[in-house]
Image (cartoon, rainbow, N blue to C red):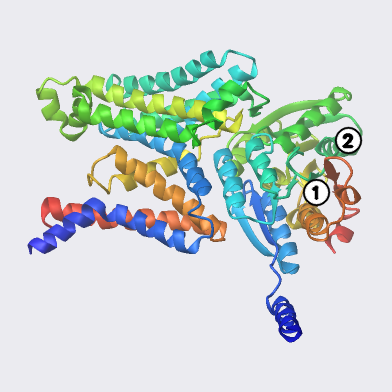
Amino acid sequence: MTGEVGFSALVARYGTAFAAFFVFCVFAVAAPNFLSATNLLNVLKQISFLAILGIGFSLALITAELDLSFANVCSFAAVVVGGLIHRGTAPALAIAAGILVGCLAGIANGVLVTRLKIPSLIATLAMASVANGLAFAVTGGVAFVGRWDPSFLAIGRGAVLAIPALVLWMAAAALLATLLLTQTRLGLHLVFTGEATEAARLAGIDIRSMKLLGLALSGFSAGLVAVLLTAHLNSAAPNMAGDFLLTAIAAVLLGMTVFEPGRCNVAGTLLGAAMIGVLGNGLVLMGAPYYLQDIMLGVILVASVSVSASTIKKAAFGI
Amino acid sequence: MRRSLAATVFGIALLAVAIPAHAFKLGIIAFQMSSETHARVANAAAAAAKARGWEVQILNSEGSLPKHAEQIEAMIQAKVDGLIIAMGKPVEADAQLAAAKQAGIPVITAVAGASPHTLFDIQVNDYEVGAQAALYLLSKLNYRGNILIERYENNVASRIRGKVLDVVLSENSAIKVLGSHSMARTQSWQEDVRSGMQALILQNQGKFQGIWASFDGQAYVIDDLLRAQGLKKGDVVLVSIDGGPESNRRIKDPDSLLTATYAIPFEKIGEKAVDAMDQIVVKKTPREKIVNGPVLYVEATLVDATTVDQISK
């Protein structure tokens, strides 16, 4: 009996991690060149955008609010950064503007949700539409491209001791988010707000401010990714981050099935992003047809979440 | 000693015959396979490569720049022998194309624009095609009358066509633009075109003689709208660009209002890319014998009532 419970708990806690390890091993054996250092660094570089956006989304979700605008806000912030760099603005100013756009969008989401009492699903969808429209208004549909300041490009293309800058940005974002959530009173208040809203309110926590902060941090992440993406691709297009909406949410959902089942957690989000990145990369190296990647991602997501969800239900309600 | 040396040489020779030659591994990246034109180039290139016995892998960037860059990096890691990129973004993926060149992987782009890191780009001159389509429409209207326009600004080719149309219109003041709609949505674009053009058609009922659409997919939606309004072939001149079997069918159809299109040979572009890869990389023909300069241009063909039967064959 105890053994069964122990096994269930192990599956609930580490099932996705085992699955990720299994997928990694399969590719290590079957996909030529998968284990090369260059390729693994490429995978880490590629998942950095996904992971940072996922961490931002998690910080909003931790307060029990959804942010469905982050991808479009990121695209809008990217064209702001790209447009300014294109016009010769100092990189520091352009970077600050991009991050500010992300933060302002997040704060606007927070105000809509906490002050006007609009459900976050609707408020952030509306914000996504506004951001999309603004991105096209800024660009007229034409991407900003050019030979930009190398010091700006280094933010997304550079490396420190052979480690790509993007990987370091991802590590920094993950570390800061973990410290915030586990080592600060503010982080505990964020978690408490999402997990027991009424109790948190009775305990004197300013729930509205916490939710606003969660959404603002999601906006901040979108702004940061906008800067990194623009520097990495040496361009800014009005829909350049649109693809990240589903994959970043998928990374967070995968992450919620591991380490702290049922809860958003930074380590889990990183693992989820890594799993998505490894899957895409490994299938390419194995020569799989392009449509198989989408199918596999869907299957793994559903399988992983459903397995862990049933285990979580069993642990929580004994069903 | 001589015997063992001869046996060794014989053995090596036997092995060389017995081991099949390494099949050329071609990577193909299409920027957005859900776009028919991208898929036509990529699929034609894949078919041409397979016909040569090559190993082929197609990837779809799903219209995402980050994914596009990732896929080029993955193809470098997959150590393909050659790479064809359909409708890619060479400026945005400059760093990845430079890495491919450094890794010794030859790259040919199709309808993407040239890059110093690729062999060359194969494309139709969209400025020329845009001018031809615009002038065809105006000539059918005898250079006077009213028209409606359906644009698409988020694609470089259709945007160029629209800009060239504006230049042509600026020189022909007897043509008046009654209304213009610009398609904004990309996922549900048919509905976007339908709602936008339906409003313009109803607003200007009986007042317009021509419609210009930036690509054939839009023209199909407009054709259906015009037919639903009870208009007959010849009531309105509907001109577009891209071509393909559906365009040919509509131009032949007595109930359709699609008058003409300038057919871009997307399949031929894909096949030419593979042929060039074969010549330059496999057969070591000097690049200059295949193309001079950074771009290999192919011609678009007018498809209207006078040419459709011949082109459909």
Residue A200: assigned label: none
Q: Is residue A185 left or right of residue A216?
A: left
Q: Nearer the viewer, mark 1 or mark 2?
A: 1
Q: Would you identify the image quadrant in which residue A24 lies? A: bottom left
- Label 2: how many Cα within 10 Å (few below 14, some 14–19, many 20+): some
Gap between marks 1 and 2, in whole Å? 17 Å
Kind of element beneath mark 2? helix
Amino acid on which the number 2 mark rests in the picture: Leu
Kind of element beneath mark 1? loop
Q: Position of residue A98 (x, y in %)?
A: 49, 20
Amino acid on which the number 1 mark rests in the picture: Ile
Chain under callout 2:
B
| Residue A2 can be seen, yes or no | yes
Chain under callout 1:
B
Q: Residue at x 49, y 52 (%)?
A: A280
Q: Position of residue A33 (x, y in %)?
A: 53, 56
Asked if the residues shown at circle 1 and circle 2 are in contact, with their CB atoms under 8 angstroms apart, the answer is no
For mark 1, what is the residue? B264
Q: Residue at x 59, y 43 (%)?
A: B68
Q: Residue at x 85, y 49 (%)?
A: B287
Q: Nearer the viewer, residue A117 or A265?
A: A265
For mark 2, what is the residue? B135
N-terminal label among 1 and 2: 2
Q: Is residue B236 left or right of residue B288?
A: left
| Residue A67 can be seen, yes or no | no
